[in-house]
Amino acid sequence: MGFMARYQQKSIEAAQRVLGSEAKVLDHAATTAGPNPTLLIGGALALVVAVLLVLQVLVSGVLIFGLAYAINRPRNLALTDRGLVLFSRSLGGKPSAVIGACEASVLRSGAGPAQLGYVPLQLGGERDWIRMKDLQRFLAAAGMPGLAGAG
């Protein structure tokens, strides 16, 4: 007698013991209550795969963006009536601490050639990238003529 046949026979005997002499057990089958087991197992597997994919994407995404954040140090640049002030940027994108200050003339003298919509500025000891439209706005606010070929 195989394992399944032995299981079947023991289940019939157990059911008969519970019923006593009220009825004779002819057969036995294991059943489940609730949704279709195939759909339940398929749904559970799909959920496991979805969770693994989401976790993989989230972990990878956090690592990639963390690395990009470390390499490309976010900054804020403010034009004031006394010149330019460079700030470190919080995770929320707002200025958090002053890094340094320089003359507004750096907007023209420290600007390099535009690349993909950004212009490099030499601000103190570091090179920062400002969007071309922001540079044009700063130049106008500071009363300086725009850069040739910009726009």
Image (spheres, rainbow, N blue to C red):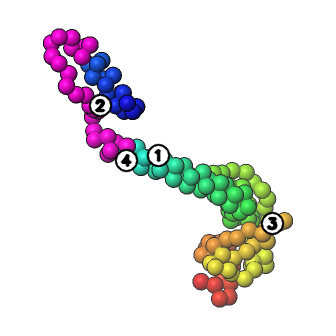
Q: Residues within 10 Å of mark 4 (few under 14, many from 20)?
A: few
The reply to whether discs 1 and 3 touch (Cβ–Cβ < 8 Å) is no
Tell me, for residue 30, which label it has, or none: 2
Residue 22 included in the magenta stretch of the image: yes
The image position of residue 131, as x and y in percent, is: 63, 73
Question: The N terminus appears in which quarter of the rendering?
Answer: top left
Distance of mark 3 from mark 2, alpha carbons?
73 Å
The image position of residue 35, as x and y in percent, is: 27, 39
Distance of mark 4 from mark 3, alpha carbons?
55 Å
- Single out the mark in the foreground, 4 or 1: 4
- Relative to 111, 19 lies left or right: left
Amino acid type of the residue tagged 4 in the rendering: Gly
Magenta residues span: 16-42
Q: Is residue 114 above or below residue 41?
A: below
Tell me, for residue 48, which label it has, or none: 1
Distance of mark 1 from mark 2, alpha carbons?
26 Å
The image position of residue 101, as x and y in percent, is: 78, 61
Q: Earlier in the sequence, mark 1 or mark 3?
A: 1
Amino acid type of the residue tagged 3 in the rendering: Glu
Which residue is label 3 attached to? 126
Which residue is label 4 attached to? 42
Distance of mark 4 from mark 1, alpha carbons?
10 Å
Q: Nearer the viewer, residue 53 or 147?
A: 53
Most distant residue in the bottom direction: 149
Q: Residues within 10 Å of mark 2 (few under 14, many from 20)?
A: few
